[in-house]
Amino acid sequence: MDNKKSTPDIKPPHELLSGIQSWRPYQSTQPCCEPILHIHAKDLSIRYHQRMALQQVNLAINQGCITALVGPSGCGKTSFLMSINRLTDLIPGCQVSGQLELKGTNILAASANLLQLRRKVGMIFQKPAVFPFSIKRNLEIPLREHGWKDKTTLSSRIESALSQVGLWNEVKDRLDQPAQALSGGQQQRLCLARALVLSPEILLLDEPCSALDPLSSGIVEDLIMDLRGQLTIVIVTHNLAQARRMADHVAVFWSIKGKGQLLEYGPAQSIFDSPQHELTAAYISGARG
Amino acid sequence: MLASSKTIGEKSTTLLVWTAATFIAIPFCWLVGDLLWHGWHHLSLNFVLAVPQNAGREGGIGPILVSTGLIVGVCMAVALPIGVGAALFLSEYTPHDQVSGRLVRGSLDVLAGVPSIIFGLFGNAFFCQTLELGFSILSGGLTLACMVLPILIRTVEESFRAIARDQRLSAAALGLSKKCSIQYILLPAAIPGILVGSILGLGRAMAETAALIFTSGYVDRMPTSLLDSGRALSIHIYDLAMNVAGGNPNAYATALVLVGLLMMINLIASRIAEQWTTKNQLPT
C-alpha cells in the first residue's frame, strides 16, 4: 500500500496557508478599527509561585479591534487574558506585576473596583459554562447583581442580548427551561449573551470555539465578527486559520526557556504575510508549535 | 456465538462478582424478612399511635415516635446550618493546602471515627450537666448534632468542590460578588450534595442508641417540651429486647417501623436529588 499515492493533494502547511489568503473578506474589505488605545500592558509579568509564566509584556490594544493571541500551549496567553479582568486574583499563588491600563486607568492598583471592572470586561471560556438554571435566570442573575431590578428593563435587556447572539427565535418559547438542555453551540451563545447583557466594553474569549462542532463554531465565530467595532475583543486561539479570518491584530506568544514572552505583535496581515521573527514564521507555517 | 467466545477467566470473574453481590444481598433480605415475619402482625395504626403500656410490652409507640422526631429535628436544625457554613468555609475560604483548612479537616476525620458512646458521655457531661439541660430531648438532639456534623460537613464540602471551576470563574467573570455567587450559583448547585449529606446524618441520628442513653433518657411519656426527657425508637427497641421480658414482639414491630422510616427517607431523598440533577432548576 502506498499512502502517498492515495492522497496526492496533501501540501505542506505553508502552501495551504497561502492558498487561504484569497478568502479573507474581513481583512481586505473592511477598514481596521479606530486607532484609540484601549488596553495597554506595560512591563506586565505574571508569576505562579516561583515560576515566571509571562515576562515583561508590552502590548497596546486598540478600541473596537479584534486582537488574537496565538502561540503554543503554556506560553502565557490565557494568563495574560485573565489578568485583563483580574481573574488571576482567583488563582492561588498567582502574582501580576507591572501596569495594565484600561483607558489610562491602572486596573492592577489595589484600589480598583473588581466587580465594576468585571462588568465592563466580559469573558467567555473554552467550555460553555452555563449556570444550572433556566435560560432566563442565567441572564437575570448578573443583571440583578449589577442593579437592574425593574421587570420590564430586565426582559427587554434579556431579549436584546439573546437576539444579538441569534438565540431569541430559538429559545423565546422556552426561557424557563434549563439552560443545560441547549446544545453545546447554543450554550456558548448563551454565555456570550450573558456577557453582552451587561453591556461590556471589552470581551475576552479563551478559545471560545475549540469545544464546539464545526457548524456551531462557525456561528459563534460569525457572531464575534459582528461585534467588531462595538467592543474591544481579545481572543486566545490555537486555530491559526481562525486568527487569520477574524483578527485585525495578532500577538504571537512564545515560551523561551520556560518563560512566556510576547514574540511579535502587529496587524494580522503583516504577521501572516511577513513575520519578523523566525519563530513566528516557523509557527504560522506549521513547522513549529 | 458471543457466549462461546467468553474465556474461562471472564466467566469466573462474572461468577465471583455475582457471588459477592449475593453475599451482600442475603443478610439484608434475611434481616428485613425476619423483621417482617415477626413484626408485621403486631403492626397496626393503633400500635403507631398508642401510648406504651406495661413497660412497652403492650400498647404502642406514639410518644416514642414523637420524641424521636423531636430529637432528630433538633439535631438537623442545629447541624444543617453549622454544617453548610463550615463546608462553605472549608471549600471557599481556605485553600486546600492551607494549615487552618488541613487542621479542621483532620479533626473532622478524627471526630467521624469516634465511637458514639464517647459522644454520649460528652453530651451528658456538657449538655446535661454543665449547661444544666438535664436528660432532655434538647440534650439528645445537640449531642446527635455533634455526632453527625463531621459526616455532614465532609459530604457537603465535597459537593461544593465538585462544582466545576468553570462555573466559579464564569460567576467571577460576570462581576458577581462572593455573596451572590454563593447564594445563586454554589448553594443551588450543591443542593443534591447537601441533601445526601443530611440523609446520611439523619440516618445515623435516627438509628443512634449509645449517644442518646445518657442524654435524652428513657422516659416513654409523651413529651410536652424540648426540656422533657424522651425515648428514641432505637432505645425503645434496645430496652424491650434486653431489659423487658416478653417485650420481643413489640421490639420487632418497633424495629420494623424504624427500618421502614429509614428506607422511606432514603428513597425520598434519592428521588429529590435525582429530580434536582435532571431538572437542574431553582424553584421560582
Image (cartoon, coloured by chain):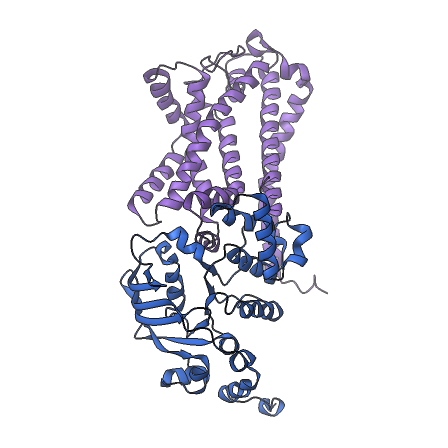
Chain colours: A blue, B purple
Q: Nearer the viewer, residue A189 or B260?
A: A189
Q: Residue at x 59, y 89 (%)?
A: A3
Q: Is residue B228 above or below residue A198?
A: above
Evaluate whether residue B189 shows in this view: yes
Question: Residue lying furthest top in this view?
Answer: B54
Q: Quadrant of residue A40?
A: bottom left
Q: Is residue A1 above or below residue A267?
A: below
Q: Nearer the viewer, residue A258 or A119?
A: A119
Q: Quadrant of the C terminus of chain A?
A: bottom left
Question: Residue lying furthest right in this view?
Answer: B1
Q: Residue at x 67, y 25 (%)?
A: B37
Q: Residue at x 28, y 60 (%)?
A: A49
Residue A35 percent across, percent down from the top left: 41, 73
Residue A2 percent across, percent down from the top left: 59, 91
Q: Quadrant of the N terminus of chain A?
A: bottom right
Residue A74 percent across, percent down from the top left: 38, 69
Q: Quadrant of residue B284?
A: top right
Q: Nearer the viewer, residue B249 or B277?
A: B277
Q: Is residue A281 above or below residue A174?
A: below
Q: Is residue A203 above or below residue B62?
A: below
Q: Nearer the viewer, residue A152 or A285?
A: A152
Residue B155 is left or right of residue B2, and the answer is: left
Evaluate whether residue B113 shows in this view: no
Residue A172 percent across, percent down from the top left: 67, 53
Q: Residue at x 58, y 70 (%)?
A: A222
